[in-house]
């Protein structure tokens, strides 16, 4: 038996109450649902990820007993095409109880979804699910259900169980197996085969994303599966074969499987295809006419921006390969070795590069490509020649479909061809380096070409072919390089060195601009560049207001990497180190030595700048699966922050010792979260003093508190007598002051730290800090907003701790202020009645 824990906080309900018949009638299996109050979807138990939907709205897990669990966030959320969803895991990844799987912007998704109710169902047969309790609020990580294996009572081999009634299903009674327009053609009674006929509802057919999902879904299954369209069968385990089949919207297809889990395989494929019914329709990418009649070349925008520069015709060359090999065994071994090297190298990629590497890995491991290459090797060809031939054959098949979206994937095939051959021959293709600021022109850009262009500092990219969803386009957008694609072959005849205007915002290339056009484009291009560059240059300087008043600009951090990044952006210190990052996404708590090493590394990256380490703030919206939390009907008002730490003084003492050992005394400050009165501060200080004594530290260590509750704000004067500094946690202070849960989409729009009530609490806290000469800062979300800076400074704040990326612009905004003006607008804000009134004051400044 496996216990399932609630993957998010919310209201639990029976599956019958889900407002969608597919789930309510248990067509997707038995289960339960949660109406979420939490934007992080966590693993309900230890499991393996079978598939994260391409649109990131669902994730399927395989549990230790073989059960397959679907977590489907919201209803009809596939139509959002991934907007509002962030995947935190990848297909095939092993996950632990409580590990984040998805992050969901509840506000953004709720605006467009049919419902946020999240069904959680067991998709495969042979398992019984017992729900422990429903129709109540549950906390993330709370035990909610049990799944156990049951003995099959199928009437005969190959026959499954009716997911609605729980009764055996035979080929003569397929009613409950009909899913929308699926037609169960046959299920042979005494064999291990199954087949199903359906029409493809996918707006863009079976293109790269659904093909990859199908392949991923079949990995844990054993049966051979084919999808036949227009009489031509395609191996459903091969992305290349599926792309080459050219399966289009509304095509009738037959899904057939043979093997021990044939029915499950057919159902899995059909479910994935049907689940994409509402995917966004991409406009077809055509090859527009080179000349629009106004002298401009029209293309398709792939990455926004404007660039003025000289044309550089870029001509990477292919490596010559020998046709004949050195024996079948040696060549097959060489090809396998090259493929393993590329698969291993992909582990180092991050962000968009990681997604692209994952797509390339699927192609490198594609059974159809490998089989085609091995057939050529068996005929005496070299591994490199065979691999190039296999790629060319599949590219031709994809090109023959005429589908523009599929044709964009040919660039990925060419890219893995180049990478594998480079490893096989020890020679990479020649990649000339363009001059800085050049407008690179090429027939089609491969993702692996991109590193050269980034290092060279090119101004823009224009391709003759390709499309806006190609992986090179994703990289260009990530790097901020303007890119226009599908501009037609005429661009390949443009002269090297000729000055052009690439306006990716308008998807045009002006091949012969006059002086006026060049001047206008250059002026438009430089305005933002100058502003950003000026902010970046002055960001390293201390922040002084126009009248000379010193305001410290610190960074909120949660990793060693963020600390290094913040220093490059001009941070003057760390105003909030969220130590939770050390405790989340793991099976056991970090020990003292591990914590010490990380704190020391962050302090080193800050190069002597102040480091304010906040002690562990878990509970509420940040549960940790391996630390015991009793059920709380309202965890935001429960044992979180300092309350949890004081209930576990062993953990708090270990963290104090790790901080004191790792952070040099000149940098070290410690801050306590969720303090409401001086009693909690006194108890924590006693534990800190014991830690100091144990380490032989005689010098006092600054210990401050976060002002996150109305109680702390009202008692700031009392707290400031004993605390060394105060820092406003505006996110929690706002939700508690306004009685509006920031995790609840129904009221999240109310949670604005510029509400007059919140400003009055900040003003009260500032008075308490001033009365005892204490340092007073803000480390909540409002500190990152340059617009709010005048009011915060006018209320008495002398330090703003922001997200690293906000620091240059925030410093620039503060430098334009003077204290008299800030105090004046703060005074006006305290007379306002609503948030709208406060923001109107700021708009007039």
Image (cartoon, rainbow, N blue to C red):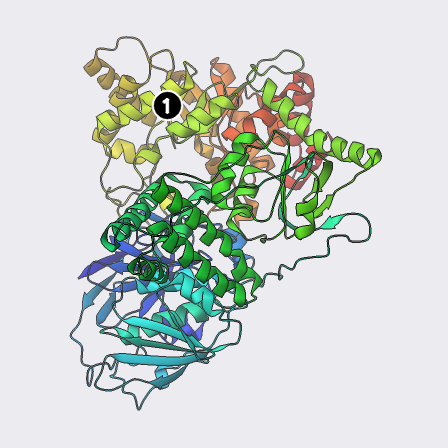
Give percent across and percent down for residue 176: 35, 82
Of residues 413 and 251, the one nearer the viewer is: 413
Q: Residue furthest bottom?
A: 172
Q: Which residue is mark 1?
A: 602
In the rendered image of this protein, does residue 405 appear above or below residue 41?
below
Horizontal placement of 34 versus 796: left or right? left
Please identify the quadrant where the C terminus is shown: top right
Q: Residue, x 51% and y 49% (percent of image)?
A: 471
Please identify the quadrant where the N terminus is shown: bottom left
Q: Residue, x 37% and y 63% (percent of image)?
A: 238
Horizontal placement of 183 versus 788: left or right? left
| Picture quadrant of residue 763 | top right
Of residues 80 and 448, the one nearer the viewer is: 448
Give percent across and percent down for residue 331: 28, 51
Number of labels in the image equals 1
Give percent across and percent down for residue 335: 31, 50
In the rendered image of this protein, does residue 538 appear above or below residue 15?
above
Q: Residue furthest top?
A: 698
Give percent across and percent down for residue 605: 40, 20
């Amino acid at each position: 038996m496996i216990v399932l824990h609630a993957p998010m906080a919310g209201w639990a309900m029976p599956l019958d109450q889900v407002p969608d018949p597919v789930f309510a009638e248990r067509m997707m299996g038995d289960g339960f649902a949660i109406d979420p109050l939490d934007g992080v979807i966590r693993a309900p138990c230890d499991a393996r990820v079978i598939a994260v939907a391409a649109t990131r709205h669902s994730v399927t897990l395989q549990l230790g007993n073989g059960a397959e669990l679907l977590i489907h966030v919201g209803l009809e959320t596939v139509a959002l095409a991934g907007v509002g969803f962030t995947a935190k895991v990848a297909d095939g990844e092993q996950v632990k109880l409580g590990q984040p799987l998805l992050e969901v912007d509840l506000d953004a998704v709720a605006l467009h979804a049919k419902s946020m109710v999240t069904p959680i169902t067991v998709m495969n047969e042979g398992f019984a699910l017992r729900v422990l309790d429903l129709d109540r609020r549950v906390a993330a990580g709370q035990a909610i259900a049990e799944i156990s294996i049951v003995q099959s009572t199928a009437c005969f081999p190959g026959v499954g169980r009716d997911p609605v009634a729980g009764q055996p299903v035979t080929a003569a009674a397929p009613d409950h197996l009909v899913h929308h327009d699926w037609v169960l053609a046959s299920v042979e009674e005494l064999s291990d085969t199954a087949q199903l006929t359906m029409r493809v509802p996918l707006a863009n057919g079976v293109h790269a994303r659904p093909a990859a999902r199908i392949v991923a879904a079949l990995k844990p299954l054993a049966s051979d599966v084919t999808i036949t369209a227009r009489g031509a069968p395609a191996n459903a385990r091969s992305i290349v074969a599926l792309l080459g089949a050219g399966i289009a919207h509304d095509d009738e297809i037959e899904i057939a499987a043979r093997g021990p889990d044939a029915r499950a395989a057919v159902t899995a494929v059909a479910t994935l295809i049907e689940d994409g019914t509402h995917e966004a329709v991409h406009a077809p990418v055509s090859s527009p006419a080179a000349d629009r009649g106004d002298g401009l070349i029209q293309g398709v925008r792939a990455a926004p921006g404007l660039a003025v520069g000289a044309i550089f015709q870029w001509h990477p060359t292919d490596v010559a390969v020998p046709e004949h090999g050195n024996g079948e065994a040696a060549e097959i071994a060489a090809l396998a070795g090259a493929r393993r090297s590329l698969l291993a190298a992909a582990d180092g990629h991050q962000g968009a590069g990681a997604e692209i590497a994952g797509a390339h890995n699927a192609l490198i491991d594609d059974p159809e490509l490998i089989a085609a290459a091995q057939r050529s090797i068996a005929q005496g060809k070299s591994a490199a020649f065979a691999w190039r031939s296999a790629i060319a054959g599949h590219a031709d098949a994809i090109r023959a479909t005429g589908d523009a979206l599929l044709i964009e994937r040919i660039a990925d095939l060419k890219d893995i061809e180049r990478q594998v051959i480079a490893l096989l021959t020890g020679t990479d293709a020649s990649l000339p380096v363009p001059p800085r600021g050049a407008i690179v022109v090429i027939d089609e850009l491969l993702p692996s070409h991109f590193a050269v262009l980034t290092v060279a500092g090119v101004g823009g990219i224009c391709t003759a072919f390709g499309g806006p969803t190609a992986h090179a386009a994703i990289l260009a957008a990530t790097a901020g390089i303007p890119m226009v694609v599908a501009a037609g072959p005429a661009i390949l005849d443009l002269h090297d060195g000729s000055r052009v205007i690439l306006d990716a915002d308008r998807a045009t290339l002006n091949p012969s601009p006059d002086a006026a056009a060049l001047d206008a484009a250059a002026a438009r291009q430089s305005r933002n560049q100058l502003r950003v560059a000026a902010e970046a240059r002055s960001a390293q300087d201390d922040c002084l207001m126009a009248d000379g008043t010193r305001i410290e600009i610190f960074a909120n951090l949660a990793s060693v990497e963020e600390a290094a990044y913040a220093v490059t952006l001009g941070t003057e210190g760390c105003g909030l180190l969220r130590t939770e990052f050390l405790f989340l996404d793991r099976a056991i708590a970090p020990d003292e030595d591990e914590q010490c090493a990380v704190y020391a590394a962050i302090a080193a990256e800050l190069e002597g700048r102040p480091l304010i380490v906040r002690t562990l703030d878990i509970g509420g919206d940040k549960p940790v699966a391996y630390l015991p939390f009793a059920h709380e009907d309202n965890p935001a008002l429960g044992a979180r922050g300092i309350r949890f730490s004081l209930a576990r003084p062993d953990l708090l003492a270990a963290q104090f010792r790790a901080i004191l050992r790792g952070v040099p005394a000149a940098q070290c400050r410690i801050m306590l979260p969720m303090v409401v009165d001086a009693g909690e501060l006194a108890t924590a200080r006693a534990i800190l003093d014991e830690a100091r004594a144990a380490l032989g530290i005689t010098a006092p260590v600054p210990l401050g508190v976060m002002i996150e509750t109305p109680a702390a704000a009202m008692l700031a004067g009392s707290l400031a007598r004993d605390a060394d500094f105060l820092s406003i946690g505006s996110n929690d202070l706002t939700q508690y002051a306004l009685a509006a849960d920031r995790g609840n989409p129904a009221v999240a729009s109310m949670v604005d730290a510029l509400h007059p009530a919140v400003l009055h609490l900040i003003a009260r806290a500032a008075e308490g800090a001033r009365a005892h000469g204490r340092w007073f800062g803000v480390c909540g979300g409002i500190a990152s907003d340059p617009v709010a800076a005048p009011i915060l400074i006018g209320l008495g704040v002398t330090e703003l701790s922001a997200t690293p990326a906000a620091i240059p612009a925030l410093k620039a905004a503060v430098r334009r202020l003077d204290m008299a003006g800030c105090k004046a607008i703060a005074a006006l804000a305290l007379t306002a009645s609503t948030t709208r009134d406060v923001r109107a004051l700021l708009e007039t400044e």
